[in-house]
Image: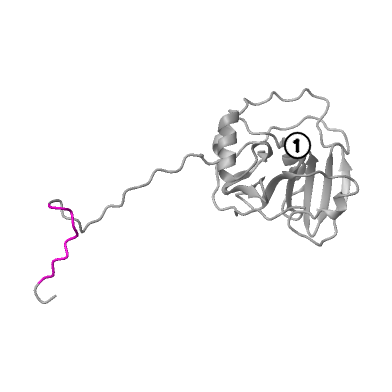
Amino acid sequence: MIRHARVLPVLLLAPLVLTACGSEKAGDPRPSGSPPAAAPAPADGGELASRARAMGVAPELVYVTEAPGFTLARQSVGVLGDDGFSATWVDGGTGALLRLVVDRGTITADSCPGQPVGDMSGEHTACAREGDAWYRTGAGRHEYALPGDGHVVRLSAEQDAVPRDVLRAAALAAHRPDAAETDRLLPSAEPAPATPVERGDLPPFGDGAPDNHVDVGG
């Protein structure tokens, strides 16, 4: 079951541009008829792991996606449930939200209808198999769910805000981040340096005690 993420989208980053796919088989979300795109440079495993664990996220559950017109809302990036991952991309023109979540578990023909789309618990969910993925609808939202090794990657959005083909392309584009994407996606594990506070009432001489002198009449 999808659980609430703890962080909401506020700020935006520069857009991640979607690479267009070739021809595709009907009913199968995996592109065919063309060789697979070259894999991006892998992230430094130690760097990704340290950044993810600092947020409480399991490193193996960190994914990133890309969609034309959408930019990452950096403050939406956070932990989902116990150690899952959640992030949201925003369309700067329409304000539409594209949410990616990754959590432990699986999804099958039997379990799919009982798992709500997004956070809409108690709503009816319709499921349709598309290749290795599930296209799911419910409560005005739609989602592509892709089972992984002990986890499920989900891309969801409002049905009237994000077209199905855009959602499908974003689901196909979901992947483990490379080094540059890790740097953009996850905050540094190192704490920010403390900024000293300047006090204007401290004299530059003596023991530095505050000047509490009271003028005549004060």
Q: What is the x, y in percent for residue 5?
A: 65, 53
Residue at image coords 55%, 32% = 47
Give the magenta range: 206-215
Inspect this view and state whether residue 90 appears: no
- List the single residue furthest toward the left: 216
Q: What is the x, y in percent for residue 104?
A: 74, 44
Q: Nearer the viewer, residue 164 or 217?
A: 217
Q: Is residue 160 left or right of residue 189?
A: right
- Please give the count of numbered marks on the rendered protein: 1
Q: What is the x, y in percent for residue 148?
A: 78, 37
Q: Is residue 60 left or right of residue 193?
A: right
- List the single residue furthest toward the front: 207
Mark 1, residue position = 172
Q: Residues within 10 Å of mark 1 (few under 14, many from 20)?
A: some
**Is residue 211 rendered magenta in the image?**
yes
Q: Would you say the magenta stretch is mainly helix, strand or loop? A: loop
Residue at image coords 91%, 49% = 110
